[in-house]
Image (cartoon, rainbow, N blue to C red):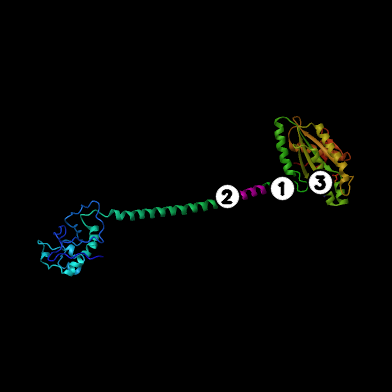
Amino acid sequence: QQAPPPPPAGMRPPPPGMPPPPGFPPPPRGNLPPPPPWAPPPHSDAPPLPAVSPVSPSQPTSDAPTNNSAATPLSTPASPASPVAAAPAPSPTTATETPQTPSNANADTAVTGPDKPPRATSILPWLLLLALAIVLLAWRASLRRSQQLALETERLSRQQRFLKSAHNQLQEKSQQLKKLSMHDPLTGVLNRQAFAAELRERIDHLSRYSQPLNLIMLDLDNFKTINDRHGHLVGDAALGLVTGVVREQLVSDDLFGRFGGDEFMIACAGRSLEDCATLANAIRTAVSAQSGSLTPPIPTLTLSMGLAQANANSGYMPDELFARADAALYAAKQRGRNCVVVADDGIPAMPVMNVPRRHL
Ligand SMILES: Nc1nc2c(ncn2[C@@H]2O[C@H](COP(=O)(O)OP(=O)(O)OP(=O)(O)O)[C@@H](O)[C@H]2O)c(=O)[nH]1
């Protein structure tokens, strides 16, 4: 920085706020900030006034030249009214350094000077930075929370899919178990309990409309002999053949079940007794005709059947219907097997008396 010109000989720097005397060199503006817009324009005939020193007015300034030679020339101006005026004038060396200090002194006084506006413009950027940092932190926290929520949603979605799949599998297993519990494992037809439950429901429903329901009891003839002669596997095959033939003859609304051993039951709703007797005979004939298809062929494979009907006259009691059909079956056996007997008022009395009654 270029050294300011020395004051003329015999002249001292002006006190603060006082214009320098004519001929006094203006203080350099080297590092001084440009004057604020509100600052009055400098007089053309006087140098700009230096800023007020941060040194308190009450602070003695007599020793200022030795302690702070940089601020001395501006903060401790010699004044005739001040005791400082008695102080010796600064040496030429001090005077030479004096012009270098106003820049720092002015910078300090710009901050705390009572007659200067506050440095709002220098605080504003920091406030903006602080606000920006707060916004960034909030945004980052929000982003992190969003990511956590997305992960949680994905985890719950996976669990939901897993539970839905498990639920479907359980439902499937439940259906399989229900089917197993209702059907005969060998032939696949309804077992006795399922058939009886369904028969009771149908009888109850048909009784409201006075509609008939026919029940056929069928039994393989001399099945024990077939088993003994050909083995139980062949006997099983014979049971399968009978089951297939019956299924072919039935309509979808008919019920078919295995009572146990070599005994089966068929329930037909909405048909006359005669139609059902025709159906039973068709089944019997078909089994005889197909018995040669077994391995080995079993030409002795025949069926005996008993048929009974529940209607408005006979009443709609499942056990009584079953007993009459069973008695008719017994009568068919008594008549030489391989035949169908229809229960009527005369038939049930005798077989039921001789055969222990079985119930659905
Ligand atoms: N192969 C096989 N045999 C069975 C099964 N269930 C029962 N049986 C046999 O079926 C036979 C049934 O014989 P019964 O009904 O008592 O008499 P039947 O020999 O058929 O003589 P009738 O009925 O008087 O014509 C028995 O020998 C049982 O062991 C089965 O699931 N498979």
Query: Three-letter amino acid code at disc 1?
Result: Leu
Q: Judge the density around disc 3: few (<14), some (14-19), many (≥20) Cα neighbours within 10 Å.
A: some
In whole angstroms, how far apart are the C-alphas of marks 3 and 2? 45 Å
Callouts 3 and 2 close, C-beta under 8 Å: no
Q: Residue 351 location in percent, x, y? A: 83, 38
For label 1, the residue is 180
Callouts 3 and 1 close, C-beta under 8 Å: no
Q: Is residue 68 left or right of residue 351?
A: left
Q: Quadrant of residue 259?
A: top right
Earlier-in-chain disc, 3 versus 2: 2
Question: Depth check: 88 or 57 in front?
Answer: 88
Earlier-in-chain disc, 1 versus 2: 2
Q: In the rendered structure, does residue 169 fall within the stretch colored magenta?
A: yes
Disc 1 or disc 2, which is closer to the eye? Answer: 2
For label 3, the residue is 240
Disc 3 or disc 2, which is closer to the eye? Answer: 2
The verdict on label 1 being within 8 Å of ligand 1 is no
For label 2, the residue is 160
Secondary structure under the numbered disc 1 in the rendered image: helix
Question: Is residue 263 in view?
Answer: yes
Secondary structure under the numbered disc 2 in the rendered image: helix
Q: Which mark is residue 122?
A: none
Q: Is residue 149 left or right of residue 177?
A: left
Secondary structure under the numbered disc 3 in the rendered image: helix
Region rendered in magenta: 164-173
Earlier-in-chain disc, 3 versus 1: 1
In whole angstroms, how far apart are the C-alphas of marks 1 and 2? 30 Å
Q: In the rendered structure, does residue 213 fall within the stretch colored magenta?
A: no
Q: Judge the density around disc 2: few (<14), some (14-19), many (≥20) Cα neighbours within 10 Å.
A: few
